[in-house]
Amino acid sequence: MLLLRKFLPVVLLTAVALLTCDPISAQPDTDPKGIGGEDTKWMVNDAEFYFKINVRQLLSSELVKGDGVKAIKDAINTNNDVKTLLAAANLDVTKDIDSVLASGTGTPKDAKVQVIVRGRFDKDKVLAAVQKREEVKIHKEGELQVFEISPSGDQAVYGAVMNAQTIVLTQSKAATVALVKTGGTKAATLSKGMRGAMARFTGKESMAMALVVNEDLRKALQKAPKLGDSAAKLQTITVSLTLTDAIALNINGVTNDQKASRQLATLLEGARATGKMLLAGLEEVPAFVPDLLDLIKIAGGKDSVTLDLRISKETIKKIKKDLGGS
């Protein structure tokens, strides 16, 4: 998940930044519901995580237009890894990129990860920009130029411009070369758990993430205080964020165990109550924060636990006013 970590901070920072922005008034049938063949054709086989940012949807939302674009750029500038990757390729995320899709599987030692950036790219300009960067190495594989970037000096990222609409990134030169040759031609083989998780998405989300809980993660969850036994029952976790003129966040964990689902819901309710109690009376905490906790809906069902947060346009305006905005 090393490549995924380079993009995730931008999403989180952007979501926070958007709260201070002025809203503007006026493949085959086997693909999971809401996820088209174009996505499954770009995923690794047996993917344990799926992560997608729908940049076009994000930028076209009423919440992001205007000041929101600046907020996205500011968020990117606060993350040096992402900033370096985009600068190396001479890309403007608010103009050139339509979507970013990442998927992967395996442990840190044998991870298979690929990131697909879709948009509009001038191949010659991108390669020319990449070659000017000191932190970039160029490897030639026949006519293909593979660029190697090490933003933080740790694990390198290997990328290539596949065509005028697609840039690909993976964890190795060989994987990048293979992806350029075969990417987008055949739907990936996905587990039942991943298909079920992705079926929760409509395809209209600004950001979507699906995670299959493997044994390593399950062992880590078992060590979580109070949550351990119940959290270890989790099979998949999905997160979706949709921006329009409002904000909708949904987190779902499938346990296939009603008792575990209800226990997790109870624990989450308790955590919310504790949070409100700790925040009460703290002058440095904005007044709207406890109100946001009240907006969270938590439910433990037959086979899953769900957390929903809906922040309306009116509430966003109130938050901005509380923060001293107009």
Image (cartoon, helix red, strand yellow):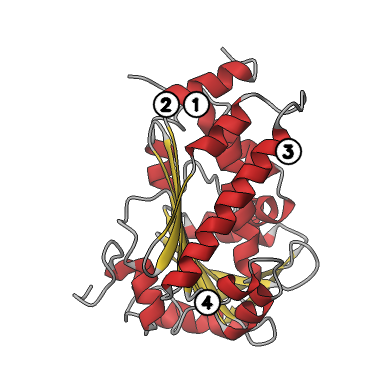
The Cα–Cα distance between marks 1 and 4, rounded to whole angstroms, is 36 Å
Type of amino acid at the residue the image marks with label 3: Leu
Seen in the picture, residue 190 relative to 320 is either above or below; the reply is below
For the residues labelled 1 and 2, say whether their Cβ atoms are less than 8 Å apart: yes
Q: Depth check: 166 or 279 in front?
A: 279
Type of amino acid at the residue the image marks with label 2: Lys
Q: Earlier in the sequence, mark 2 or mark 3?
A: 3
Mark 3 highlights which residue?
Answer: 278
| Label 4 crowd bin: few (<14), some (14–19), many (20+), radius 10 Å | many
Mark 4 highlights which residue?
Answer: 233
Q: Is residue 119 left or right of residue 149?
A: left
The Cα–Cα distance between marks 3 and 4, rounded to whole angstroms, is 29 Å
Where residue 167 appears, as percent x and y from the top left, is 49, 64
Determine the secondary structure under disc 2. Answer: helix
Where residue 157 appears, as percent x and y from the top left, is 65, 71
Mark 1 highlights which residue?
Answer: 316
Q: Is residue 304 left or right of residue 175?
A: left
Mark 2 highlights which residue?
Answer: 313
